[in-house]
Image: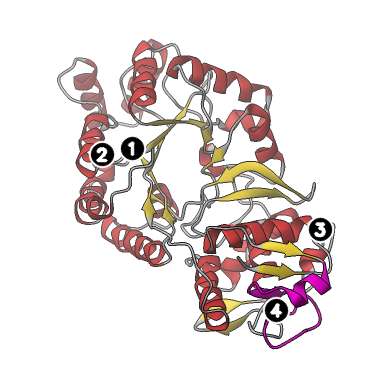
Amino acid sequence: MLLLYTHTATPRLQYIVDFIGKELFDESIQITTDEAHFKTSKQPRLNYSAQEFSEGEFFLRKTALLFETGIKHQPIECFEINFHKAFFETKGDFSFDIFAASFYLLSRYEEYLPHEKDMYGRYAHTNSLAYKEGFLSQPLINIWLQSFKKALQFKFPELVFRQAQFKCILTYDIDMAWSYLHKGWQRTLGGFINDIGKGEWAKVKDRWLVLRGKRKDPFDCFEWLDAWHLYCRLKPYFFFLAAKKTSLYDKNNSCQSSEFRDLITYYANTYHLGWHPSWQSGDDTSLLKEELEWLEVVGDKKIFHSRQHYIRFSLPATFRRLIETGIEKDFSMGYGSINGFRASVCSPYYWYDLEKETTTSLMLYPFCFMDANSLFEQKQTPQQTYNELMQYYEQVKGCKGVFIPIWHNFILGTDPAYEGWRKMFELFMKETVYWDAYTDE
């Protein structure tokens, strides 16, 4: 067990030490503020303070962030070490304060500071240190931890480290289960009128054939997905949008539709059922409990997993509301505007409420890839997306982290507008996922 000395065991320090301890060891890192006990201990010792005590310890000179309270602008200067960026440069057996730097990124400290919003009112990725310094595409904290582990091993060869395993967890956002079916007569009629008005006669014909049962709905790829999950021995997460009323951004099938309810029930019994809070619930919080309760009744089970629709969240308000509704795991930590590592990490971690200075019960599962980002935001072809997908996959695998991609049924369906994306997914499943299959029970 590693013994860490500090002059003050603050909530921030305890949080990041718990995270790093979980990532590196099977046992927690023990924190002490007793200098005499630390100096005489026979355990491997890490001195995280302003003064070095002896040569037998691992000395990491502290910086100020973990011993402050409140939120203020942090002057950050990045430098390069082992071909990767780092900041909070310091002295000792490691060249930067990995505790403070990791805390800054994990806590999303910068998102509490004044910042510009994107067109959807979200934190714009262009504000982030990761984007500005060019490490958004890297799970930088995990990369740092690999270097930190080597440094500790060199100092303390007797230390036993955790044997981490790579995991791939597939997730799907079901914003609209069907393109034409089960919409109700008003939306169906409106769809016909809209297509005719635009002169989109191919869509008119397609809609008519689907409604008459002569052709499969272009968004309905559920049986096809089931076959791939069976082939790869996977239990993915399906996040269903269940807004009671449609809006500009909430266009799910009617909650009155028995077919929609049956689909939800099926996935609740077969895989992991998750909640996709509507856009409207971000403005009207009274809808949160209503949507979640409806989904739990239909699925006939308590739901503990969520992901925000359009990845629309703001800190700390959104995550506090999720905790209040009973959510234990959230899969929203990523950007809805670009692929990459929003928190610079590929490991699940507990959310730290920076305003309340406390570790919460909400576990965050960060994603780094979403098909809609590649298609709509980055304007990529299926081939370009496949290359990007594999780069992220191999990076996370190299760190023995958790790779969580987001897929949408409408992109993986048979709509001609998304030609090539289905084949790209098949290639990913057959050539990659199958060989590294991980069943999350």
Q: Which mark is residue 60?
A: 4
Under circle 4, the secondary element is loop
Distance in Å between CA atoms under marks 3 and 1:
40 Å
Where disc 3 sits, the SS reads: loop
Q: Looking at numbered disc 4 in the image, what kind of residue is underneath it?
A: Leu
Alpha carbon distance from label 1 to label 2: 7 Å
**Which of the 4 image quarters holds residue 156?**
bottom right
Asked whether the beta carbons under mark 1 and mark 2 sit within 8 Å of each other, the answer is: yes
**Residue that carries the numbered disc 2 in the rendered image:** 229
Q: Check disc 1 and report the residue beneath it.
A: 235
Residue type pointed to by label 2: His
Closer-to-camera residue (144/186)? 144
Q: Residues within 10 Å of mark 4 (few under 14, many from 20)?
A: many
Residue type, numbered disc 1: Lys
Magenta range: 34-62
**Residue drawn at 32 percent across, 62 percent down:** 390
Q: Nearer the viewer, mark 3 or mark 4?
A: 4
Residue at image coords 75%, 51%: 354
Magenta-drawn stretch contains 60 = yes
Crowd band around label 1 with a 10 angstrom C-alpha radius: few (<14), some (14–19), many (20+):
many
Q: CA distance from mark 1 to mark 4?
A: 42 Å
Q: Are marks 3 and 4 in contact (CB under 8 Å)?
A: no
Counting residues from the start of the chain, the first of labels 1 and 4 encountered is 4
* Whole-number angstrom distance, CA of label 3 to CA of label 4: 24 Å
Figure check: 70 above or below 419: below
Query: Looking at the picture, does residue 413 appear above or below residue 256?
Result: below
Q: Give the side of residue 302 with respect to residue 203, left or right.
A: right
Asked if residue 253 lies left or right of residue 320, the reply is left
Residue appearing at x 25%, y 26% in the figure: 217
